[in-house]
Amino acid sequence: MGSSAVGRLNAPRPALVEAGPGGAPKVVNREFVTLVREEWRVVDRWWTEDPVDRRYFEVVLESGRNVCVYRDREAGCWFAQNA
Amino acid sequence: MVACLLIPGFELRAALRARPRLALVPAALAPEAGEEPLLGPVTAAADAVGVKPGMRLGEALATCPSLVLVDRDPAAVEREWEGVLRRLEDAGFSVDPVEHGVVAFETRGVERLYGGVQPALERALAAVGTTWDPRVGAASRRFTALAAASVARPGQILLVGAQEEQGFLEPLPLSLLPLSADRYAELEGLGLRRLGELARLPAGAVAERLGVEGRNAWGLAHGGRKTKVRGRRPAVELAETLSFPEAVANELTLRRALGSLLERLLARPERAGRPFRKLAVAARLVDGGSWRRTLTLRDATAEPARLRAALGPKLGELTAPIVELRVEAVELAEHTGQQLALVEPAGEDASGRLREGLKQVRASTGTGSVCAVVEVAPWSRIPEARALVVPRDA
């Protein structure tokens, strides 16, 4: 089918993440994390039926790539997104 | 309502138009040259003896030794499909072709003309003709309409009301979803067989396990998004054909024939000075099959030398000697000429060129491929809420 619908720019993409004991990512999409550069939380829309509760991590992978991932605490899964 | 008209096995039906007797015997569309040896659509007689579409060639021949393999005929498919679309357009429907044998259209514009949804869809079926065994599904969402058409019988119209959509989709098989074979296998391994079973799973879990493809499939299992159907711009009938007294394979002769066809096409008054944006070159092969290639030009042009240079190399892809060569103007540009400038274009001139470039991209990649980014909440802390990607088809 044709893809002529309105879409969101920078929509989150599901990511395969293995987290350490503190919740920080150790492996992202089968690549080891060498450094966690930054970490922050976004809690928003808690007054709606679609609340947002995310824990973001900006990490550097073994290959040198910078990746931003977050754990969605509502859905309980990980996503990658340019924050 | 969004309606979807479906003609299953269209490529086989089109190839059998010239050999109607084969429609009554076990026959199947031959696998594409150079591809995996998997059968295309099959006739009802082949289906009755256990030959199914997508079956391996060896297995199919072992199941039915008398199976007739029908050569692919892309030129006939294109011609017949264009005929179906034009008949629908003549009946007043603004069609959005999805692929050969599948077309979507809105009924809203013609409901008053024909006195309701049902009479309008009956008119659509009549326009296509009973020889194609068309069937129609209609619903408020496109995927539901397609699903309804997929389960309808030949000549049947299946209307699904907005309130019944979820209940209608639930018992349908997962094979209606546009997924790769690996994904189907994965879903079957998880014990999922029906759209309703997938729809009942949490969206997050599906996305995590099956990725973006799975998430999209989950969305479709819920009926998919409500999207507008954008009708295509009706094509111009502009083509030139050259028949050879005997089969030709010599590249020099073919290039000369192409040059002559292009000159004849350029001289046609219907063109009204407009340059070509997209062209197709087709041939009838000596063994009865056909061959077709389309080409979107980098810039719309009417210069014979540039057209020859762009289309000439395509002739090298011919698989057999040919008895007929045809050049079709698939799409023409609106402007009649372009003045080159000494200085860098600016203002309205630059915008005009940008618009022309976008039309060229659209002609090459299809509807919905050109989008604009619209900021809606740039201050938002949620990254995906900051901007939308909106298709620009105007």
Image (spheres, coloured by chain):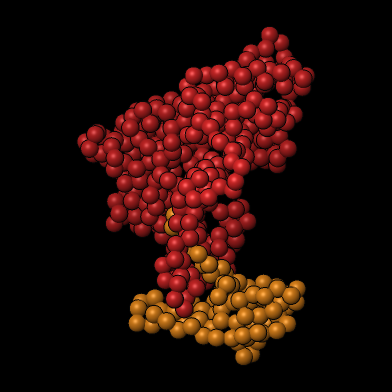
Q: Horizontal placement of B43 versus B321: left or right?
A: left
Note whether A14 is above or below B248 in the view shown. Answer: below
Q: What shade does chain A have? A: orange
Viewer-proximal residue among B291 and A38: A38
Viewer-proximal residue among B203 and B187: B203
Q: Residue at x 49, y 54 (%)?
A: B371
Q: Total marks drawn? A: 0
Q: Residue at x 62, y 28 (%)?
A: B303
Which chain is in red here? B
Q: Quadrant of residue B18?
A: top right
Q: Horizontal placement of A44 versus B73: left or right?
A: left
Q: Quadrant of residue B243?
A: top right
Measured as percent of width and height from the top left, residue B292 is found at 63, 29
Is residue B390 among the parts visible in the rendering?
A: yes
Measured as percent of width and height from the top left, residue A28 is found at 66, 75
Q: Residue at x 57, y 22 (%)?
A: B266
Q: Quadrant of residue B258?
A: top right
Note whether A8 is above or below B291 in the view shown. Answer: below
Q: Residue furthest front?
A: B342
